[in-house]
Image (tube, helix red, strand yellow):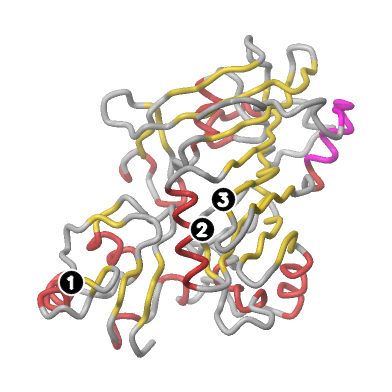
Amino acid sequence: MSGVQQFTITAADGDQRLDRWFKRKFPHLTHGRLEKLLRTGQVRIDGKRAKAADRLTAGMIVRVPPLGDAAEPRPDDLPGGPKPVTAKDAEALRKAVLFKDADVIVINKPAGLAVQGGTGLDKNIDAMLEALQFDAPERPRLVHRLDRDTSGCLVLARSQAAARKLAEAFRHKTARKIYWAVTVGAPKMNEGKIDAPLVKQSVAAVGRRSAERVQIDEDEGKKAITYYAVVERAHDKAAWLALMPVTGRTHQLRAHCVALGTPILGDGKYAGAKAYFAREALDNQLHLHARSIRMPHPTRGIINVTAPLPPHMQKTWKFFEFADEPDEDPFAGLEL
């Protein structure tokens, strides 16, 4: 890896110190060398000299000078990490495109496909973005994330300028994201607001990064708010929920549904055996889908995209005889 690089900070990577971002992005770069790069002004944020303790926010651009051997290999490039995109994977990714113009691409991310790389992951969308470059001069950029097992609308920027605008929409909460979920059990109230601060469990508590979890913590947790509405009930056995997160914490919807007393179907990580029933008829996969997204376009108007359900959730819809769509917008008139 050589030459100066410019990285646009996504909403998911925001709200952290610059030195911690470097540690995650370039694990082989020593702290001493990073400090030297900072002292000599080679690392910059939005064109200005930076310090290790500077906090990053979505939309910022970090200038990274040539790092030589310290930039390689990244964890994603090690043996067993993501492989170069195959023709088959590239075709599947292109077929997943729901919306495309000169600035933005929205895909229907398949359940089970990671957005970014990590230990034990064979492939991820970030490593295959060249397949979605089409005729653009730049490689697409991620501007937010979805959990590996969550399907649905994933927004990509086709330029650095578009990435900044889209990241600002997520940061300022002008992006309206609606998720559909099937829960085990049905909430007592048909609609409500879940206001439960979340904190990531320590590495010692979860054992390894792949087991990353969050928990409610009123004292140390970061603000996390979700609105929910019951669209249909399958008696008291299950429910179809529409979920609208105001904040975007890791595993927020999964933890909030557990707090509601109705874990998401197939979410064994947060509910164990309680996350499953009717195993002979329903798939064990996580039943959480980013159904739609509505947000300002980087240059004009509004983006409004809806993603069809993945196969395992279509099967569950048929099993419970749920309707194809809600009778009305569950969150119509809600002012955030």
Q: Main secondary structure of the magenta part?
A: helix
Secondary structure at numbered mark 1: strand
Q: Amino acid at mark 2?
A: Leu
| Picture disc at residue 146 | 3
Which mark is first along the chain, 1 or 2? 1
Q: Residues within 10 Å of mark 1 (few under 14, many from 20)?
A: some
| Residue 52 image offset from top left, x and y in percent | 17, 63
Q: Find out whether residue 57 is within the magenta segment.
A: no
Q: Residues within 10 Å of mark 3 (few under 14, many from 20)?
A: many
Q: Amino acid at mark 1?
A: Arg
- Looking at the image, the residue that sits furthest to the top is 188
The reply to whether discs 2 and 1 touch (Cβ–Cβ < 8 Å) is no
Q: Residues within 10 Å of mark 2 (few under 14, many from 20)?
A: many
Span shown in magenta: 313-323
Name the residue that disc number 2 marks.
166
Q: Nearer the viewer, residue 15 or 295?
A: 295
Which mark is first along the chain, 3 or 1? 1
| Residue 300 image offset from top left, x and y in percent | 61, 60
* Quadrant where the image shows the N terminus: bottom left
Q: Find out whether residue 315 is within the magenta segment.
A: yes
